[in-house]
Amino acid sequence: MSARPGAPAINRNLPDVAVVGAGAFGGWAALSLREAGAKVTLVDAYGPGNPRASSGDESRLLRLSYGPREIYTRWARRAQALWEQRQEEFGTRLFYPNGSLRTMSADALAEQRALFDRLSVPYEVLSPDEVHARWPQVDFSEYETVFYEPTGGVVKAREAMVAASEAFMHKGGTMKIGHAKPAAAGGSAPLTVDGKPLACGAALFACGPWLPRVFPELLGDRIVTPRREIFYVGSPIDDHRYRWEHLPNIADSHTYTAADVDYGTKIAANLRDVPMDPDEGDRMASGFLRAQVEDYVARRFPGLVGQPIVATRVCQVELSDNGHFIIDRHPDLPGVWVAGGGSGHAFKMGPTIGEYLAARVLDEPGDSATDALFALASHKARTHE
Ligand SMILES: Cc1cc2nc3c(=O)[nH]c(=O)nc-3n(C[C@H](O)[C@H](O)[C@H](O)COP(=O)(O)OP(=O)(O)OC[C@H]3O[C@@H](n4cnc5c(N)ncnc54)[C@H](O)[C@@H]3O)c2cc1C
């Protein structure tokens, strides 16, 4: 069969690569690897953007403020440029630039300002009255100052993963629905899919919250997967003030919101760490969180009081021990890589992560400090008491 028009030629000097997981890590990595000329098979048990995946909700937030963690500010800035390019390329809107408002302590504010000044990232420090003058629909009257970051915005989540996998296939990548497992060292292939060996030179396991299950000895104590619940609050039919065109996202001390991108105002409930099984976990939202969401609406968005919850989503985050991503070669399985530990902030970075992972798997020279930050050796296994 001849190659698809526009598909990169396969470079025979590169390893054939299997990527397991079509989420923020694997979906973008597969696309970048294919664009680099590798022959790539992307395997997902349930499909790109499926409702069990951490990348499966409607939307995710893109912010550049990461306190002192400069690497993520840089990666998020790069990601924003890539989201803008990719939505043009895919012909579908994925990024909505509405900025964000954050509450933070005086020390955190000073630290954030210093980093943004050094990197020339725009910001403003506003009084509650200034916030009210610009966005009368939000109330921050209990704070002295609010940090406003005009860059960043909302990215579509589920739709982005579907679009990335379609672009991947269009460029000649192979997508398989199947259950992948690492094979024992020394076998004919580094992995099996639905029990059959899949021969390849490198296998990247980007299984998100399933990683502790796929590699229990290596990652069972390095990643935990607590439950998270999201509520979407509707607006009155003729009230557009809560849409992204008119309102930034909000990062509060115990919750965050995304402005309405055709789905209602998104409010993350503040849930204590309840373990969640990504395969079997119940995806019905908990009724007891309704009061918490309504209290928050009354405080921050008084104009939405009494409006209905129009949708809910339940998922899990995959928290590493220190909040940094985990990206490394498997120490005992030749050709096998692990990538994940998104820790509640990886979705926005997807296009940047994809570039980085492709370079790592293809053995291109990179930044050793970044590699070390994500290395398994930098992540401690949690101790059980
Ligand atoms: C409620 C919530 C809010 C969040 N908010 C933000 C935010 O505002 N901004 C932000 O940047 N990030 C946010 N995050 C974090 C971000 O969504 C995740 O870090 C990111 O989506 C994780 O991507 P992943 O590729 O590691 O995992 P996933 O998206 O879960 O992808 C893993 C994929 O692997 C597949 N898979 C697993 N095991 C196998 C197997 N054995 N064989 C085949 N396939 C397999 C699964 O089907 C799945 O599709 C949030 C997360 C949650 C839960």
Image (cartoon, rainbow, N blue to C red):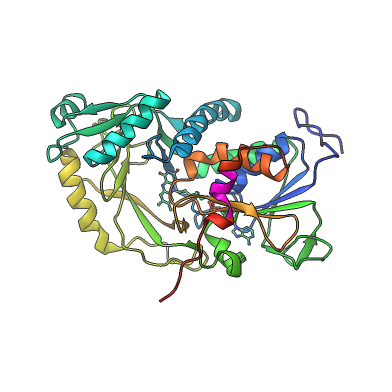
Of residue 246 and residue 54, the one placed in the foreground of this image is: 54
Residue 103 shows up from this direction: no
Whether residue 282 sits left or right of residue 45 in the image: it is left
Residue 345 locus on image (x, y percent):
44, 46
Q: Is residue 207 above or below residue 233?
A: below
The quarter holding residue 117 reads top left
Whether residue 117 sits left or right of residue 140 in the image: it is right
Q: Is residue 384 above or below residue 180?
A: below
Bounds of the magenta segment? 370-375
Q: Residue at x 27, y 36 (%)?
A: 109
Quarter of the image containing the C terminus?
A: bottom left
* 372 inside magenta stretch: yes
Quarter of the image containing the N terminus?
A: top right
Q: Residue at x 27, y 30 (%)?
A: 240
Q: Residue at x 77, y 31 (%)?
A: 8
Of residue 286 and residue 113, the one placed in the foreground of this image is: 113
Residue 147 locus on image (x, y percent):
26, 33
Residue 177 locus on image (x, y percent):
67, 55
